[in-house]
Image (cartoon, helix red, strand yellow):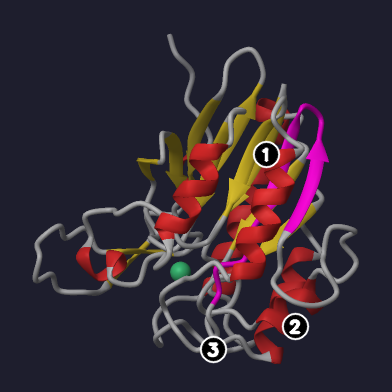
C-alpha cells in the first residue's frame, strides 16, 4: 500500500497579515499539519505530502519565508506544485532541495514512491487566475507517461481539467484541457488526477479518469451552482485528502473535524 497525503490551497500570507483581513492562513496550516501528524499512527505509513498549489496568497518572498518556517514542522517529506497565486521562482526556491525540482522552466516533476509514480505538472500562468499547460509541459507529460504504462500514476495539477459547476471557478479553470485530454486518452495505464484551486472536495471525471479536487487548509469557495453566482469565501470547511494505492485504491477526505478526540462506542 502506498499512501500520499494531498494538502492544497494554503494561501499563506506574510507574517502578521490575514487573508482578506479575516483568516489566519498560517495558523490554519499549523493546525492542519499538527492534526495530520496526530492521525499518522492511525492512517500511516504515509510516504509523501504533496502541496497542490496556491501555497501563498501573495507570491511574495515574505509569504514563502513564512511558509518555509511552518513546513519545517512538517512530519513527512513534501513536494510542491504551483497554483495561480504563486510565483514560479518562489515555489522553486521553497523546494529547491527536492531532487525532483527542476532548476529552470515549468515546475514539472516525477517521483517514484513505492508502486506509485507521482507526477507534478505546472499550470501556472503568472499574473492570471486561469491555468494553462505550456507546450513544454504537455511534451514533458506525454513523454513521461510513455514510460509509465505499467505503473499507477497520480498526476498533480493545480487547476482541474474538468468543470465543477461553480461558474466563477470554471471561468478560471484549465484553458487547454483538450490538449491534456489527448495525452491522457493515449495513455493506457492506471492514472488518477489530483487538483486543488476550488477549495472544495469534489470528484469528477476527465478523459475517462477520476479527478479528485482537494479542499483548502483554511477556507472554502462558497457553494453556489447558479450561472450568475455571487462569489465569496467561507472560513473553515478545511481538510486534506489521503490517496491510497494497493489492492484497493481510494481517496479519503480528512476533515479538520477528524482531529477531535473521539468518544468511545458503548
Ligand atoms: Fe486557492
Q: Can residue 75 be seen in this view?
A: no
Residue 25 to residue 205: above or below: below
**How many numbered discs?**
3
Mark 1 is surrounded, within 10 Å at the Cα level, by few (under 14), some (14 to 19) or many (20 or more) other residues, namely many
Q: Can residue 175 be seen in this view?
A: yes
216 sits to left or right of 147 = left
Q: Mark 1 near ligand 1 (CB under 8 Å)? A: no
Nearer to us in this view, 104 or 42? 104
Magenta region: 109-124
Residue 224 position within the rendered picture, expressed as x and y whole percent measured from the top left? 16, 60
Mark 2 is surrounded, within 10 Å at the Cα level, by few (under 14), some (14 to 19) or many (20 or more) other residues, namely some
Give the quarter of the figure containing the N terminus.
top right
Q: Name the residue under label 3.
A: 17
Q: Name the residue under label 1.
A: 4
Q: Residue 32: which quarter of the image?
A: bottom right
Residue at the spot x=71%, y=68% of the render? 107
Residue 65's disc is: 2
Residue at the spot x=55%, y=74% of the render? 124
Q: What element carries label 1?
A: strand
Q: What element carries label 2?
A: helix
Amino acid at each position: 500500500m502506498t499512501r500520499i497525503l494531498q494538502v492544497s490551497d494554503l494561501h499563506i500570507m506574510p507574517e502578521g497579515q490575514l487573508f482578506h483581513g479575516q483568516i489566519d492562513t498560517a495558523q490554519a496550516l499549523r493546525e492542519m499539519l499538527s492534526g495530520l501528524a496526530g492521525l499518522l499512527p492511525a492512517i500511516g505509513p504515509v510516504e509523501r505530502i504533496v502541496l497542490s498549489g496556491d501555497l501563498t496568497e501573495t507570491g511574495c518572498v515574505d509569504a514563502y519565508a513564512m511558509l518555509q518556517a511552518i513546513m519545517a514542522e512538517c512530519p513527512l517529506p513534501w513536494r510542491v506544485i504551483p497554483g495561480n497565486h504563486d510565483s514560479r521562482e518562489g515555489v522553486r526556491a521553497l523546494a529547491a532541495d527536492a531532487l525532483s525540482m527542476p532548476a529552470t522552466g515549468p515546475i514539472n516533476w516525477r517521483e517514484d514512491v513505492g508502486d506509485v509514480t507521482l507526477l507534478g505538472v505546472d499550470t501556472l500562468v503568472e499574473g492570471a487566475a486561469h491555468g494553462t499547460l505550456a507546450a513544454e509541459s504537455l511534451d514533458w507529460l506525454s513523454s513521461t507517461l510513455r514510460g509509465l504504462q505499467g505503473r499507477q500514476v497520480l498526476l498533480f495539477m493545480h487547476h482541474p481539467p474538468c468543470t465543477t459547476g461553480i461558474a466563477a471557478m470554471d471561468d478560471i479553470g484549465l484553458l487547454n484541457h483538450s490538449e491534456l485530454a489527448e495525452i491522457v486518452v493515449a495513455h493506457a495505464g492506471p492514472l488518477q488526477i489530483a487538483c486543488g484551486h476550488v477549495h472544495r472536495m469534489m470528484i469528477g471525471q476527465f478523459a475517462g479518469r477520476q479527478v479528485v479536487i482537494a479542499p483548502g487548509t483554511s477556507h472554502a469557495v462558497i457553494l453556489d451552482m447558479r450561472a450568475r453566482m455571487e462569489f465569496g469565501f467561507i472560513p473553515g470547511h478545511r481538510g486534506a485528502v489521503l490517496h491510497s494505492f494497493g489492492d484497493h485504491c481510494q481517496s479519503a477526505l480528512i476533515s479538520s473535524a477528524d482531529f477531535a478526540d473521539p468518544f468511545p462506542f458503548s
